[in-house]
Image: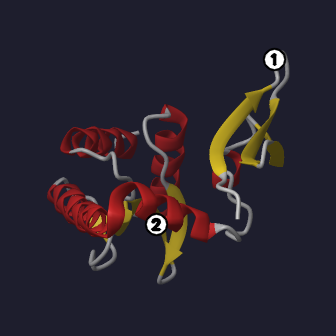
Amino acid sequence: MTRATIALVTLALLGSAARADCLVLKRGGKLQVWGMPATIGQGNNAIDVTPDSSRRARAVEVWAALKSLGRSGLAEMIERNCRQARWLAGELSKAGIEVLNDVVLNQIVVSFGDDDRTTRAISALQRSGEIWCGGTTWRGRAGMRVSVSSWATTQADMERTLKAILDAGRQ
């Protein structure tokens, strides 16, 4: 089997609101391109900022993480992301933001009070461009889902995330 080189390429079409996100594979000197058209400016949707389309190729991400970090490196990253999520949940709780779930992995679901205020906070956070968190429904309540899931996330990133969420909650 030929070794595959994988690169994520974002193509911006100048003078247009449209763009295409592509996954480019180079095999045996031939390029294979997978693209997903997306639009900018019509709200934020995770599909518009990632090459994700119904999560069919999740094994590629796992393979890349194992290849670059190794087994122990991947385990350390997961443990660190879980610690960072617990830290963020604790800080948000101290600030009066309700943490709706038991934070046992890297996911946090929070509420800013009532559903309307939570929805406004999510919109403000997404408009800020500082971080991206999506909305969800947790046991019948509107919530904001925070996911800590990167090998590159530092404590400084977590503090910046905390500030961005607190700022969004004040709007």
Kind of residue at badge 1: Leu
At numbered mark 2, what does the secondary structure look like: helix, strand or loop? strand
Above or below residue 119? Residue 167 is: above
Above or below residue 22? Residue 68 is: below
Q: Which residue is tagged 1?
A: 14
Say whether residue 135 is left or right of residue 55: left
Discs 1/2, front: 1
> Who's the residue at 39% across and 58% down the image?
149
Task: State which quadrant residue 157 falls in.
Answer: top left
Task: State which quadrant residue 58 falls in.
Answer: bottom right
Whole-angstrom CA distance, mark 1 to mark 2, is 36 Å
| Residue nearer the viewer, 140 or 21 | 21
Above or below residue 58? Residue 153 is: above
Say whether residue 47 is left or right of residue 83: right
| Residue nearer the viewer, 23 or 16 | 23
> Who's the residue at 64% across and 42% down the image?
8
Kind of residue at badge 2: Gly
